Amino acid sequence: MHNYLLQFTINLKLWYNLSCYHDNLPAMAEGGNMNAYEVFASVYDELMDNIPYDDWCTYIIEVLKKYGVNNGLVCELGCGTGEVTERLADSGYDMIGIDNSYEMLEVANEKKLDTGHESILYLMQDMREFELFGTVNAIVCVCDSINYLTELSDITHVFRLANNYLESRGIFVCDFKTRHYFRDVVADSTIAEDRDDVSFIWDNYYDAETDINELALSLFLPEEPDDECPLYRKYQEFHYQRGLTLEDMRKCVANSGMELVAMYDAFTFEPATDSSERVYVVARETHQDNKHYE
């Protein structure tokens, strides 16, 4: 599959996880009876069918085990429909999934009943303000969810919250797309795909002055999918991600009080560089005087 098309599905996933952060969502298209979240949730897994979740989760698990998290409680921020959460549960982790979309969590909860992972706890929360009932061994936030936090202060605060809810010496694993990727790889481009029951057009624009990447997404869904010649309704959204640098992330981790352990070129254990397109960050919990430790 074309790399841009794969990145579209990644960006779409992240919009689901974080779209509640934007106030300009249309409640619905004229004449329809589903809101925007219901519309996108209804086709989400189909549009994500090209993402190699198995390979990605194998790498995430390798990172967790490399830093001593072989089992126990793990929280995923921006869990969407639970594809990563489910796979981590398959590997023996006790999972909590957090997302800001009720409709996506409905799909995740249905999925866990089908897979037998009924012990997964899903919570509807904004990752910038997430709360847990206690501490966890690790927190993960992948598929560039961090890029949707366009203010560095918000990223710092997520790290600060992670530090608060991690067990002693627990780890936070997150990934991000780099400024290099948005500026030099995807930049200004248009991608389209036409399927039998859904089509999309993705227009991408990167503003080098602000480091903000704008994604204009148009989805075309049939009103009556079973009709031989259905009418298609257009849904359109605009979404924003920030291109981040290694130095940005170093500052965010340092300002949060966490310990920066490593930044890897994605899906390897090689150090990230300025030419990396996706970077995995590993940060460790540091002792806090006002925190209760067992």
Image: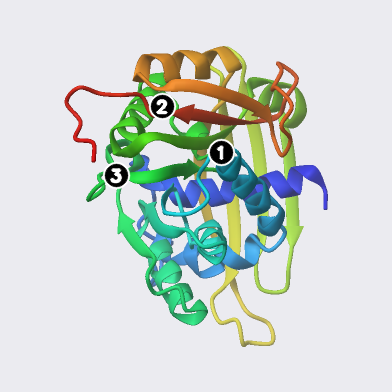
Q: Kindly identify the amino acid type of the residue bearing the numbered disc 2.
A: Ile
Q: CA distance from mark 2 to mark 1?
A: 12 Å
Number of the label disc, if any, that sits on residue 152: none
Q: Closer to the camera, 66 or 237?
A: 66
Q: Closer to the camera, 30 or 195?
A: 195
| Residue 12, above or below 170 | below
| Residue 231, above or below 276 | below
| Residue 23, above or below 208 | below
Q: Provide the secondary structure element on which disc 1 rests.
A: loop
Which residue is disc 3 drawn over? 135
At which x and y percent is residue 77? Answer: 42, 46
Which residue is disc 1 drawn over? 144
Q: Kindly identify the amino acid type of the residue bearing the numbered disc 3.
A: Thr
N-terminal of the two: label 1 or label 3? 3
Q: Closer to the camera, 281 or 294?
A: 294
Which residue is disc 2 drawn over? 155
At which x and y percent is residue 237? Answer: 50, 47
Q: Residue at x 25, y 23 (%)?
A: 288
